[in-house]
Amino acid sequence: MPPTNNDRSLVIVANRLPVQRVRRGTTSTWQTSPGGLVAALHPLLRKHGGSWVGWPGGEGGSSRAFRHDGMDIKPVTLSAGQIEGFYEGFSNGTLWPLYHDVLRTPRFRRSWWRSYVEVNQKFADAIEPLVGPGSMVWIHDYHLQLVPKMLRQRRADLRIGFFLHIPFPAPELFARMPWRAEVLEGLLASDVIGFQTRAVAQNFLRASRRLTRATGSGCTLRLDDHTIRVQPFPIAIDIEEFESLANAESAGERTRSLRAKFGPKRKLVLGVDRLDYTKGIDVRLRAIEEVLRRGEFSARDMCFVQIAVPSRENVDDYASLRREVEQAVGRINGEYAEPGQVAVHYLHRRLSREDLVAYYMAADVMMVTPLRDGMNLIAKEYAASRIDGTGVLLLSEFAGAANELRQAVLVNPFDIDGMAKAVQTALTMPPAEQRRRMRSLRNAVHSYDLYDWAARFLGALRGDQDA
Ligand code: G6P
C-alpha cells in the first residue's frame, strides 16, 4: 500500500522525469511514464505535494515548472552538447561500464567529465528554489552523484538521500577513474546512501575509506563533521499491479493467443531486457544455440523469444551489440529453424505492461541472465505474474535479485555450456519441482513491495533508527 510521509516535504530528483511528452498532431501533452520508480513515488508526491526534478528527454525545450497529475514537475533541459557529454558520454560511456565491472572499456574523457559537472550543477540550481527548510531531497542514480555536495554547500538544513540503482564496483576498479575523489565526496554529502545489495554497499564503504578522508566502521561513515548512513535497500516491484494484470480476463486471452501463435505444444523460453551489453543477451543466444546443437531439443520442441527494448542507440557499444545480437539470431535460425517454425523470435521494441505480463504467463522458462545487474526487476515481475504457480526462472548469479530469489535455477551467465545445461534442466523440470520452487520465489517477492521499499528509505532519511 502507498506509505504515508508524515512530516517534511519531499523533492525527488532523477535523470528521467516521471512524465513523457506525447505529440498529437501539432500539439503535445504529458503522460505519466510506466515503470516502477514512478509508481512508487507518485502517490507520495501527490499526497504530500512534492516535486520531481528531471530531464524531459530530447534536446532543449521549456524548463518552466508545471503540475501534472498532482505532482510538481521541474524539467531540467539539456543542450545537444550536454546530451553527448553528460548523458551518452560520462553517464553511459564512463560510469555505466565502470560500475558494471568493466564489461566494456570505460572512456575517461575530460570533456565528458566537464559536461557531467556542468549538468549536475544545473540540477542543483533547479532543486534549490523548490526546497523549504528541512525538506527531504531524494536523488536517484549514477547520473547525479555530484548533486548531494552541490546542494549541501548551499543548504546545510536539508536531509539528502541518494539511491544507486546500479552496482557499485570493487574499489580496485573504481580507483581507475581520474575523478574518483570528486565522485565519492559528491555522494558523501548525503545523509543516507542506499544500494541494492550489502556487497555493493561494502564496495562503496571500502572505496570511501580508501580514497577519501572518510572514516568509520559498519554502515556509518564520518567525513569532517558529517555522518553518513550507508545501507542496502533492495528495490522491489508493485506486486498488486502485476497480480491484477495477471488476473485480468484479457491477460488469459492474450496468453492463450501467444501460446497458439508460438505453437501450443512447443516449450517457450523467454528473455526480456533493454538491449544493453550488461544483460548478457549475446551469451544467452549462444546457450540456446548450444541446446539446439546438442539435438535433444529442436525448433519443433521449443522456441526462444527475446524481447529487446531499444536503448541508448547513439552510444557505440549499444549499436555494435545490436548488430551482434541480430547476426546471432539470423545465424541460429539459418541453422536450426524448421519450415514454419522459427527457433529464435526477436522483437526489438517496447511492449505494454499488459503484453509483457501475457508473455511472462506464456513462458515455460524465463532467462534472466545479465552479466552484471544492480537488481533486475524482470526476475521479480516474472514470479509475480506466475499466478498458476508454475514456470522456471533461470537467474544470473550476478544480478542483485539472486540474493533474494534463491530457488531460481542460478546460472553463471558467462558459462555457455552451464547455461545450455540449465536450459535443458528447466525444459524437463517436473511440475512438482516447478511448483515448489515457484512457491518460494513468489513468497520472496511477496515479502515486501515497492511501497515498503520507498517507505524504508524515507524512514532512514528522516532518521528512524529501525528503518
Ligand atoms: C537503468 C538505470 C536508470 C535508467 C534506465 C533506462 O535502469 O538505472 O537510471 O533510467 O536504465 O536508461 P535510460 O538511459 O534510457 O534512462
Image (spheres, helix red, strand yellow):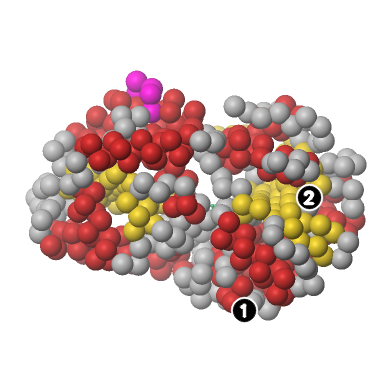
The residue beneath circle 1 is 176
Could you tell me which residue is drawn at 23 percent across and 60 percent down? 420
Q: Point out the residue furthest to the front here.
A: 217
* In-image side of 32 versus 382 (left or right): right
The circle drawn on residue 160 is 2
Sort mark 2 into few (<14), some (14-19) or many (20+) by Cα contacts within 10 Å.
many
Q: Is residue 3 above or below residue 410?
A: above
Q: Earlier along the polypeptide chain: callout 1 or callout 2? A: 2
Which of the 4 image quarters holds residue 275? bottom left
Q: Point out the residue furthest to the top here.
A: 249
Report the amino acid beneath label 1: Arg
Mark 2: secondary structure: strand
Mark 1: secondary structure: loop
Report the amino acid beneath label 2: Ile
Which of the 4 image quarters holds residue 434? top left
Which residues lie in the magenta part?
246-250
Query: Residue 175: in sight, yes or no?
Result: yes
* In-image side of 291 versus 221 (left or right): left
* In-image side of 461 versus 406 (left or right): right
The circle drawn on residue 6 is none
Q: Position of residue 59 (x, y in %)?
A: 64, 55
Q: How many marks?
A: 2
Could you tell me which residue is drawn at 66 percent across and 40 percent down? 456
